[in-house]
Amino acid sequence: MDFIRCDGAALTLVFALEAGGTGDCVYCGLRLPADEGLAALAASHARGRHESQPDAPPRPGLLPERKGGWSGAPALVLRRNGQAVDTDLRLENCDHAEGQATFAFVDPVAGVAVNVRWQISAGDIVSATCTISNRSETPLEVERLAALALPVPARFTEFTTFSGRWAAEMQEHSSAIAAGGIMRESAIGKPGFAGAGWVLLHAGEETLGAHLAWSGDAWLTLAPDAQGSGDGRAMLMMGAGWSRGEVVLPPGESYTTPPAVFSLAPDRSALAQAFHVHARTEVLPSRATWGPRKVHLNSWEALGFNLSEGGLMALAQSAASLGIERFVLDDGWFGGRRDDTSSLGDWTVSPDVFPNGLDPLIDHVHALGMDFGLWVEPEMVSPDSDLYRQHPDWCLHVEGGARPTMRGQLALDMARTEVRDYLFTRLDALLGEHPIAYLKWDHNRDLFPSGPGQAEGFYALLDRLRAAHPRVEIESCSSGGGRIDFGVLTRTHRVWPSDNNDAIERLRIIPAWSQFLPLEVLGSHVGPSPNPITGRRLDMDFRAKVAMFGHMGVEADPARMTEKDRATLAAHIALYKQWRGVLHSGALHRLAHPDPNVTGMMVTHGEKALSLVAQTEFSPVFDAAPVRLAGLEPEARYRVTLPEPWPGKARHYLANPDAWRQGLTLSGAALMGHGLALPLTHPETAWLIALERLPQ
Ligand code: GLA
């Protein structure tokens, strides 16, 4: 048995290599001393054979197969001529270099070769892919292939998954890794709300997070070695999902999975920071060149489909007076689309709404000092559209079968070149003819029936458009939250985390997404009150403070706000501009508080830090427990202020307003250990805490 190790900054992976046998990850954890004895490390966790086990106990390792008596799910399911192919893949060699290892497995009898590649990159994120090659004379159908098969270190005994629904995405569900295991799967042609793309494993505070970087269907299994057929460790697997017959390899051909990424860290904040470093350095397109994230005003919750040139110009005017920097024209600007029943596919400016074309509005927006963004939903077609009347066969459908709609629409077959060419031509013309800085790219219908190659087709169109218009920023919106992953984020600049702008809901949704994604990509809007989805009424002060922790925007009509609310909103937009450099570059910390209804987040960056602390319910005690901060230098001294405006009722409970205005000077140790006693008794109260490290 040979052993190799791969090291990240704070992470070590140790692999055991058994020539002609398996490759296994026998250590995955905090970085080990350089002289750690790897054979001893493996021996310290080796298990003897127990009762009722095959005489040669199976070692599923990095490539679990249905062989040798292992009863868990396999990483690959293959067929030839409709018959299952049982593989016996054996390790042929391992190509090992700094921070990466590729394990080559071969089964000469089945005519199959598999390469498992793990690489540690920025943020100590491990990226895993799997390549399968058909080395036989007959086609090989790949029914399932895991990008990642991770034998879970035994100390991880709990897990959290993230499933949800439209407007209530990313709900955390935690439980023990128990007999039976779990399976999560999306089957709607995109990640959707099934939670198959994200998972956390817990060993006390220590947390391992994994994600599949893919914008199509995904599956995830987490199964304990319940029947004891392996070595006692649970197995985590993640992979892309596809329809039967979608991946068939002709002789000599190969297929590589999209990457699954994972990392582990001492706690959830440290894990979030690792994912954010990775997203900023390896995922987001040219992140280093991004300017400040502009404050948006989006027309959707302001005007809906009630669009007119005059109304939009007035909206732009009132937006500019609040300090908005980008005006985004949402749904309803094209073809005959006056409601959501028609015209998707007809991507030409509607003369009914814009008798003089789009340019007068764009000129007006520019004259007000803002840039202009536009909503599109390219992959969809309305049955009531010129496109559908011309090309009824372009949608995903079963010949002769029913064509059920969702939101009154059908999905185009993105695997077809002529469909992609049409969409490219239309979008390219729009971007070429008008100075459009930003596209909100929506995708509101699930893909049914399914069709092969849809995610690949989507990527191809997006890549072509970005190559032609490299300066246009793009948002991935899919009913809010439906297509968010590191695959789409290698091509886009932000995501729409949820259609739900209710600040109380956002206090759950943003911390969930920001477990993996940095705040600068999470669109975060101040919506109207009452909220159109939940019906809840919330103070502007509360809505605006919550919206600051993300890529801030407004999705309401300022003309329908009171003068006081407009002033409060403008003050928070100014605060966001002052703090976005910190919020969008720094390290995010989740703040713990004994009251479960208090949510705290904090971002530290250089000398500065900003925290948001929000109470959603009526506190059971008069004086809520002090808020203990995080991520500070214990010995350093900080000037602490509470940026104004302060929340309405709660401000009266602040004991020494002047002291908070002047700033308190406290050590990092005091701030993290002793905390700050803030009036957090009243429901829907939020405070900002600003810190500045003082020179030594
Ligand atoms: C989806 C999006 C919304 C809005 C509407 C427009 O629901 O998530 O933000 O753009 O479509 O129809």
Image (cartoon, rainbow, N blue to C red):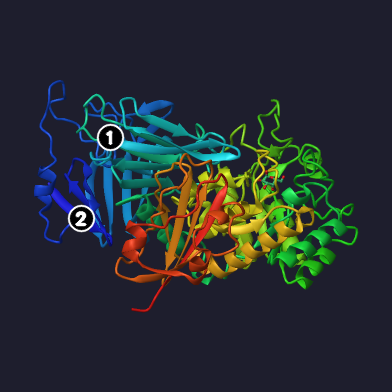
Category of crowding for the residue at label 2, using alpha-carbon neighbours closer than 10 angstroms: few (below 14), some (14–19), many (at least 20): many
Pick the residue in front: 364 or 4. 364
Q: CA distance from mark 1 to mark 2?
A: 22 Å
Q: Residue at x 57, y 56 (%)?
A: 651
Can residue 626 be seen at all in this image of the molecule?
yes
Identified by mark 1, the residue type is: Ala
Q: Residue at x 11, y 43 (%)?
A: 44
In the image, the residue with mark 2 has its CB under 8 Å from the nearest atom of ligand 1:
no
Q: Residue under circle 1?
A: 234
Identified by mark 2, the residue type is: Arg
Q: Name above or below for residue 169 compared with residue 549.
A: above
Q: Within the image, what quadrant is residue 532 found in?
A: top right
Q: Name above or below for residue 667 compared with residue 511.
A: below
Please report whichever mark, 1 or 2, sits nearer to the chain's N-terminal start: 2
Q: Residue at x 82, y 55 (%)?
A: 349
Category of crowding for the residue at label 1, using alpha-carbon neighbours closer than 10 angstroms: few (below 14), some (14–19), many (at least 20): many
Can residue 584 be seen at all in this image of the molecule?
no
Pick the residue in front: 187 or 596. 596
Q: Secondary structure at mark 1?
A: loop
The furthest residue to the front: 655
Q: Residue under circle 2?
A: 5
Q: Residue at x 76, y 39 (%)?
A: 382
Residue 394 image position (x, y, % from top left): 70, 40
Pick the residue in front: 210 or 520. 520
